Image: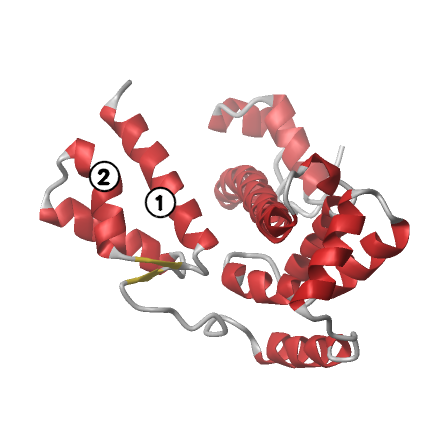
């Protein structure tokens, strides 16, 4: 396997480990993870920079709310206020509820969901500043929690439940961020294609001193008819340098 591939896989594992540790990891843990690659000090510093840029603390905690907008902070305060109305449970009660939920008891599943709800915004705060709003992250976490509490029957011990549910919430939020990034990348590609056609049309219009036809633009720019027509369609016919047919 190429070293670049191994590096990427290790970096992803380090990132996941840090997420599981409340967005915190030590330099010792990072160095141990990359020990087989014998990275230079400069390369290791690049790894640390990458982690910090992704809001992961290296040898020191990060401020989970640093990337929150004022509106998101207000939303979080209001959301946490609603959760304070949920009745608390002792450790013994929580274990009994979890065991009943694992056995499929509907009331226990509902109650365990309530008890786990405060975990959702705490986890969501770890993923802010990555292109998805806090409200959407909490929404994804809540959906994952609702699904997860119905799947606890596969566990052997009650103390495994919280970890499983937390992982499902984290995975859901990471999937949401990845989907958002992919959509943004796709939108950028579309915008680039439209801009390329518009720029070529504007340049030719200046030369001819009139709106240009699709055929003229094809001949002068080398763009295909499909590329031009797609750009016109996507822009809602707003590339004014191209004459309407």
Tell me, for residue 68, which label it has, or none: none
Q: Is residue 9 above or below residue 163?
A: above
In percent of width and height, residue 66 lies at 46, 74
Q: Are marks 2 and 1 in contact (CB under 8 Å)?
A: yes
Q: Quadrant of residue 243?
A: top right
- Residue at the far right in the pictured view: 106
Q: Nearer the viewer, residue 178 or 184?
A: 178
In percent of width and height, residue 8 lies at 33, 34
In percent of width and height, residue 192 lies at 52, 41
Please name the residue shown 69% across and 71% down the image: 90
The tally of labels here is 2
Please name the residue shown 69% across and 48% down the image: 238
Please name the residue shown 10% across and 43% down the image: 40
Q: Nearer the viewer, residue 115 or 190?
A: 115
Neighbourhood count class around disc 2 (C-alpha, 10 Å): few under 14, some 14–19, many 20 upward: some
Neighbourhood count class around disc 1 (C-alpha, 10 Å): few under 14, some 14–19, many 20 upward: many
Q: Nearer the viewer, residue 147 or 7?
A: 147
- Residue at the far top in the pictured view: 1
The C terminus - image quarter: top right
The N terminus - image quarter: top left
In percent of width and height, residue 157 lies at 63, 44
Please name the residue shown 74% across and 38% down the image: 153
Q: CA distance from mark 2 to mark 1?
A: 9 Å
Tell me, for residue 34, which label it has, or none: 2
Tell me, for residue 14, which label it has, or none: 1
Horizontal relation, residue 240 to residue 5: left or right? right
Q: Earlier in the sequence, mark 2 or mark 1?
A: 1
Q: Is residue 171 visible?
A: yes
Q: Nearer the viewer, residue 197 or 131?
A: 131
């Amino acid at each position: 396997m190429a070293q670049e591939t191994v590096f990427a896989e290790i970096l992803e594992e380090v990132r996941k480990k840090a997420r599981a540790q409340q967005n915190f990891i030590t330099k010792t843990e990072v160095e141990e993870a990359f020990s087989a690659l014998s990275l230079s000090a400069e390369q290791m510093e690049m790894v640390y920079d990458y982690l910090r840029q992704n809001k992961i603390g290296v040898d020191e905690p990060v401020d989970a709310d640093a990337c929150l907008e004022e509106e998101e902070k207000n939303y979080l305060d209001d959301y946490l206020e609603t959760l304070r109305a949920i009745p608390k449970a002792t450790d013994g009660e929580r274990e009994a509820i979890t065991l009943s939920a694992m056995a499929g008891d509907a009331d226990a599943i509902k109650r365990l969901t309530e008890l786990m709800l405060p975990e959702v915004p705490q986890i969501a705060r770890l993923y802010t500043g990555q292109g998805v709003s806090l409200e959407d992250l909490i929404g994804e976490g809540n959906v994952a929690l609702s699904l997860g509490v119905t799947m606890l029957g596969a566990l052997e011990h009650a103390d495994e439940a919280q970890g499983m549910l937390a992982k499902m919430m984290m995975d859901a939020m990471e999937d949401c961020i990845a989907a958002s990034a992919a959509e943004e990348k796709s939108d950028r590609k579309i915008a680039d294609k439209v801009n390329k056609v518009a720029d070529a049309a504007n340049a030719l219009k200046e030369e001819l001193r009139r709106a240009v036809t699709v055929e003229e633009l094809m001949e002068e720019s080398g763009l295909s008819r499909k590329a031009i027509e797609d750009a016109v369609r996507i822009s809602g016919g707003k590339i004014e340098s191209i004459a309407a047919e």
